[in-house]
Image: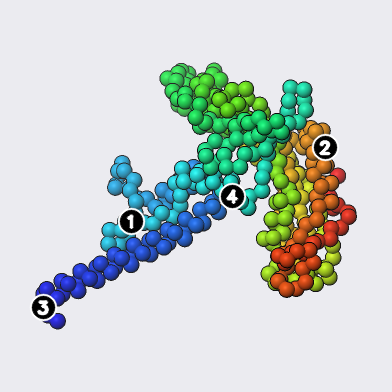
Amino acid sequence: MGDHVHKMAVRNVTRRRSIGAIRDWRKKGGDVLRARWGQLLDSHAAGQIQRLRKWLEHGTRGPGGRATRLRLARGVTQMRMLPTREQLRTERRVLLDADDVPGHFLFTTTPLGRLERWDYVRGSSSEGLRRYQNKFAAERRLKSHNNKHWDAHHRPDAGDESEHEDGGVYVNNSDAETEGCYAPLETDPVRIEELLLNADSFVEDMDGGNETKVVAVGFDALAALQSAINHAVKEGTTAAEVEGDPPMVMTFAADGGTVRRKEITAFTVSLSLPCLENGRTDLTPIVYCLSGEKRVGRDIASYINGVLVDLLSHSFTVPVAAGQGADDDALGRHRLVLHPTLQVCGTL
């Protein structure tokens, strides 16, 4: 036991086992966190995740040093807890093409003032360029400042700063002022076009140009509600229990407000049923109108009315426990009875 060679061998084996255990913990922890990256897509911007990632995973080499990954024991670095900005954007693009994600479409107006629908081309988001198709099979793409055709570069203008500055106070210029904070007037035409593009949504030709403003975003409400029922039904629900419950009630709601300085009016619908976990589904959007409540066009209102008619006449089904007398197919599904009265939620 006192042999020097034996002690060194035991020390080396112990060290290798420690390094292996840390690496195994790092890999398994990273795999678990990576599987949950999709949950970050809900109301979290890529830039916010990037800053949080640096705070959690990186350190510095001292004042002015380059940021490096935090070091753990045995020289192993901190696991990747959050995705990079590009990984998060890739996750968002791929998730849009998942099989369980209901379809969506855009509405624009023609030169004659009629509503035109553009259905999303499934798979195009994963390819990096989101495309939409109308009833005539004509394709257009969602305009973005990082599309391939957008090759102009922002060059800051040396004259952006005010020539009349005294102690941080700007006078006699056109810069924007809010609560004592000043923002320079943007003069770069490329940057101005990018800012305008981020304020509204447009579709354009596949080779760029001929842009048309998007007035509303619609969703496949039938598929979305059926998917919500499938995920929200209580485990072990039987056909007999569903038949003994009151009829399913549909609730229609509409509300408008400002989201990131943009007026949006949401038209939603939900289903209430005792066999669901919370008694009803979440609010499922029919249409998001990119305007205020008082500026919703007649064509969009007519479309929403048609969707409600289809929803009230549709036969929704609920999954039931196997062998409990499902009445409509062999997969264990039971057809729901919908109350003929549509419940409207709103203020008058």
Q: Position of residue 278 (x, y in %)?
A: 72, 63
Label 2 vs label 1: CA separation?
58 Å
**Quadrant holding the N terminus:** bottom left
Q: Are marks 2 and 3 in contact (CB under 8 Å)?
A: no
**Left or right: residue 109 compared with residue 95:** right
Q: Earlier in the sequence, mark 2 or mark 3?
A: 3
Inter-mark Cα distance, 3 to 1: 34 Å
Q: How many marks?
A: 4
Q: In the drawing, does residue 247 fall left or right of residue 192? A: right
Labels 2, 1: front one: 2
At label 2, the amino acid type is Ser
Which residue, given by chain and number where applicable, does mark 2 sit on?
302
Measure the alpha-carbon separation of dots 1 and 4.
33 Å
Does residue 48 appear in the picture of this structure?
no
Could you say where residue 319 lies in the image, as x and y percent from the top left?
Answer: 72, 64
Distance between mark 2 and mark 3 Cα atoms: 90 Å
